[in-house]
């Protein structure tokens, strides 16, 4: 189906928004009236610009407070509408959005509303325009889609139909199933948006917190199925009011928007994409650093051994158990990182820049990524280098699609020369999870990217108290936990501690691992005594157990499945490590302890 996006969903001038929509592959746009009013272009010039970009103008919006008002007020409304319809003719737009009235002058009279909307449609027809009537979730008397449809049906005018908006329908908890009984030709337009499920005023929720489909908690796909069952064949259009999107770059936001519609169409059977190839594990984490000594000292204390060196690049492989860390002393700035993405400079020090994901079909994973507007990154490759594909996550992190020790597939390890006489310990240590702090304007995009492109499952969002504000986190993972990636928005934009990323190493015995680390000269993050006093009040421990945790700075958590023990190293550059022990099927990441950890990191800087 054709796709469209409302200009209010993107940031910038009207020209910038149109360009971003076209480059992202949209077929059309909804032009928000304020964008036109603020533009130096005439309606004819906007029409020509859209034509040059290959965009249709699918909707002009909105007209407000039109219906069920006193006669003198309605006369003024018709005068205003006549002027707007003339503008639409200049734009080349043939459908106008009319929102249900919120005016204090409006009365609760469906017959009056239907009669006045029919008169508006008469005027619109003279200009070759159709009227799409939409129920606002906070409308004064009409706030549900079924009520709006009854009024349209009563009016019985061929130039009057309804506009369905997933936010207004799902935010009120309305049942979308009866949509399937509305004649498809009377659904003049469909607007799609997702949203988280907070407890707040619906108007504020709508104006500030909408998301693209797949980024919130609404069943947008379920609603779309009912709309398609009704016979709707118009565009799938995104209308997303979001404070973050309004401040972010229009181009990447438009790509994110288009990706959300591709995934939505796949979900409801409207389009076929290469199937997702779910990763089966973490092959490696790559640290980029201008000075290798601090991080290699840390890795040595953690029990890693330097086992191999890249044949042609300044990259070393460090291993312990099943965990592998690459230390890259090459350029610290990623050439593909987006502006404001945290790509960084050499002054940032050590940082987690790339992740290798074990893939059962790297080529298939790359095909899906490209189909979802994530091009495979160009890569400098010497003769004999393994042909590895990599894509860029929204924050600029390189994600390599890897095969390790599988004879039928290229092996990234073949690019490394083993160092003689060095063997890594085989003690069950593995990468348990990778915590990737996101720039504030990429968080929702990152969640959708990891779900759609990589096929990971997204858990519920969690808010954590940081000393300088709330920190938001949402984990994505495979069903078996082989890949776990908590995505986090740092609380303090200018604070390197809040923006540090970390590698969590799973170990069968965190106490023994912590002792070995400190005995090797490593420094664990000190945890305040008050934390352990609280643990003693909340849980019962065996003799000496809590004293050991207090001594080493080990934190403790429980869920319905098991127990989690974990501790943290000091931060090097923008990276730190976590030692974790999961017992009994514990599912989380110690979120209850995050405020204590964050405060301790701020203090320890």
Image: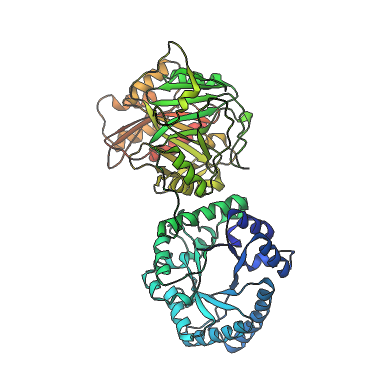
Number of dots carrying numbers: 0
In the rendered structure, the answer to whether residue 120 lies left or right of residue 264 reads: right
From the top left corner, tell me how far across and down residue 179 is, in percent. Answer: 40, 72
From the top left corner, tell me how far across and down residue 572 is, in percent. Answer: 53, 26
Q: Quadrant of residue 239?
A: bottom right
Query: Can the viewer see residue 94?
Result: yes
Query: Can the viewer see residue 109?
Result: no
Whether 298 is drawn above or below 500: the answer is above
From the top left corner, tell me how far across and down residue 601 is, in percent. Answer: 49, 32
Q: Nearer the viewer, residue 155 or 77?
A: 155
At horizontal 48% and vertical 44% (from top left) the residue drawn is: 367
At horizontal 55% and vertical 18% (from top left) the residue drawn is: 293
From the top left corner, tell me how far across and down residue 442 is, in percent. Answer: 54, 46
Whether 342 is drawn above or below 96: the answer is above
Q: Quadrant of residue 173?
A: bottom left
| Quadrant into which the C terminus falls | top right
Its colouring scheme is rainbow
């Amino acid at each position: 189906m054709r796709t469209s996006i409302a200009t209010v969903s993107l940031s910038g001038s009207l020209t910038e928004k149109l360009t971003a929509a076209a480059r992202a592959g949209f077929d059309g746009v909804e032009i928000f009236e304020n964008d036109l009013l603020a533009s130096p272009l005439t309606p004819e010039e906007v029409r020509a610009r859209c034509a040059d970009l290959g965009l249709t103008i699918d909707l002009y919006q909105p007209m407000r407070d039109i219906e069920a008002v006193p006669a003198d007020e309605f006369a003024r409304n018709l005068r205003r509408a006549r002027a707007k319809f003339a503008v639409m003719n200049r734009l080349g737009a043939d459908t106008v959005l009319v929102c249900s009235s919120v005016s204090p002058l409006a009365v609760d009279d469906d017959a009056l509303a239907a009669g006045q909307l029919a008169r508006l449609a008469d005027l619109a027809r003279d200009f070759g325009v159709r009227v799409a009537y939409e129920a606002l979730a906070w409308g004064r008397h009409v706030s549900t889609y079924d009520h709006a449809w009854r009024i349209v049906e009563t009016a019985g005018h061929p130039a009057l139909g309804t506009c369905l908006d997933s936010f207004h329908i799902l935010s009120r908890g309305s049942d979308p199933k009866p949509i399937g009984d509305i004649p498809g030709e009377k659904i003049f337009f469909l607007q799609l948006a997702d949203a988280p499920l907070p407890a707040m005023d619906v108007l504020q929720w709508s104006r500030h917190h909408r998301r693209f489909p797949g980024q919130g908690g609404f069943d947008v796909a379920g609603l779309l199925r009912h709309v398609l069952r009704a016979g709707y064949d118009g565009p799938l259009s995104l209308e997303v009011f979001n404070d973050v999107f309004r401040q972010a770059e229009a181009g990447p936001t438009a790509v994110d928007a288009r990706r959300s519609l591709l995934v939505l169409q796949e979900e409801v059977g409207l389009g076929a994409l290469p199937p997702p190839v779910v990763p089966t594990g973490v092959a490696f984490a790559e640290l980029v650093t201008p000075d290798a000594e601090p991080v290699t000292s840390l890795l040595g204390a953690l029990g890693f051994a330097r086992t191999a060196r890249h044949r042609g690049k300044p990259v070393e492989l460090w291993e312990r158990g099943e965990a592998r860390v690459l230390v890259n002393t090459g350029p610290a700035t990623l050439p593909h990182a987006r502006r404001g993405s945290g790509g960084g400079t050499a002054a940032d020090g050590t940082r987690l820049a790339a992740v290798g994901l074990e893939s059962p079909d790297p080529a298939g994973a790359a095909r899906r990524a490209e189909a979802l507007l994530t091009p495979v990154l160009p890569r400098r490759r010497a003769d004999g280098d393994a042909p590895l594909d990599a894509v860029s996550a929204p924050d600029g992190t390189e994600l390599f699609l890897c095969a390790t020790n599988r004879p039928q597939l290229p092996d990234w390890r073949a690019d490394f020369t083993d160092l003689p006489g060095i063997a890594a310990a085989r003690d069950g240590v593995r990468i348990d999870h990778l915590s990737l702090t996101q720039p504030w304007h990429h968080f929702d995009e990152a969640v959708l990217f990891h779900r759609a492109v990589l096929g990971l499952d997204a858990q519920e969002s969690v808010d954590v108290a940081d000393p300088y504000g709330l920190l938001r986190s949402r984990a994505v993972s495979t069903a078996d936990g082989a890949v776990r990636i908590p995505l986090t928005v740092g609380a303090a934009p200018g604070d390197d501690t809040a923006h540090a990323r970390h590698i969590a190493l799973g170990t069968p015995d965190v106490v023994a691992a912590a002792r070995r680390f400190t005995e090797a000269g490593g420094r664990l993050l000190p945890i305040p005594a008050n934390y352990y006093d609280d643990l003693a009040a909340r849980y019962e421990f065996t003799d000496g157990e809590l004293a050991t945790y207090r001594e080493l700075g080990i934190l403790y958590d429980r869920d319905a499945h098991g127990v989690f023990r974990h501790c943290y190293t000091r931060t090097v550059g923008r990276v730190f490590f976590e030692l974790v022990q999961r017992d009994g099927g514990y599912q989380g990441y110690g979120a209850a302890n995050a405020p204590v950890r964050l405060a301790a990191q701020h203090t320890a800087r």
